Amino acid sequence: MNLQAIAESAAIAGKEIDLTGCDYGPHRLSGLYLKVQPYYHFLAGFVRTLGVRKILEIGTSYGGSIMAMDRGLRGKEPGTQLVTVDKVDIAGEAVGALAHIKRIHGDSLSADTLRKVRQHLDAPIDLFYLDSKHSYDHTQKNVAIYGGEFRPKYIILDDIRLNDEMARYWTEAQARFGQFAFDASAAANRPDGFGLLDFAGYSSSRGGEKQSLPPELTAARPKP
């Protein structure tokens, strides 16, 4: 399937997955407690449609999105790995009760956090979902670091329309990835934007080229 077909299939599949309890939690600006968000169904459907088993999320927040992806799994098959990273620990009790979801607290751009993620996640992975600090620089570095280190089949970028910096990053990503990039905002029912990248397809088209880690993180790489 091409990316558009994948996105459409994920949207359909997600509608049938019960996400009761996968709440967004308190909104950081309004303080209002928000329940399940529409795009959570897309994430669950994406996992279900593609048989995803190994997931990395950066941006745990309250835990609703990683719980939604967990609901999309086809049972706890051998090799299932779910890791979520956040700089602060504000996750709700529901995700805290799920021992198979490994929660890591720390700056995703630090060598220490990368080392901790590596302890719980084996490359290549199926999905890298990035919903963290919504700036051009932060997004670029996370994609370079974790894309290069864990070689995900797919990358989903949240909030690609949220501000000028994210819009700029997505415009450049579309230019670079070409047919391997798709704006899934409509399928995900996400006005702030959902960008889908076929990272494995893009890498394969370039002869297996991998993005390398920046120099400040090379110390965290495995020793020979």
Image (spheres, rainbow, N blue to C red):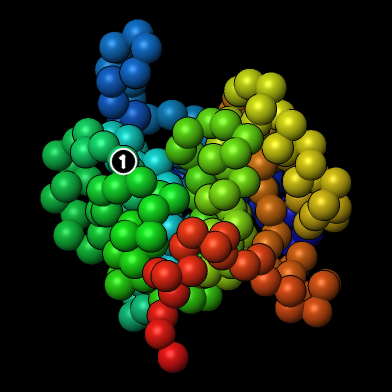
Query: Going by the picture, which residue comes out furthest to the top?
Result: 30
Residue sitting at x 33%, y 57%:
113
- Residue 105's spot in the image, x, y percent? 26, 48
Front-lying residue, 206 or 36 = 206
Please say if 125 is above or below 10.
Answer: below
Q: Is residue 36 left or right of residue 153?
A: left
Q: Quadrant of the N terminus?
A: bottom right
- Residue 23's spot in the image, x, y percent? 30, 31
10 Å neighbourhood of mark 1: few (<14), some, or many (≥20)? some
Q: Is residue 215 visible?
A: yes
Residue sitting at x 76%, y 46%:
173
Q: Is residue 201 left or right of residue 100?
A: right
Residue sitting at x 28%, y 26%:
25
Residue sitting at x 31%, y 70%:
120
Could you tell me the amino acid type at mark 1?
Lys
Please say if 120 is above or below 72.
Answer: below
- Residue 99's spot in the image, x, y percent? 17, 60
Front-lying residue, 65 or 143 = 143
Please say if 63 is above or below 115.
Answer: above
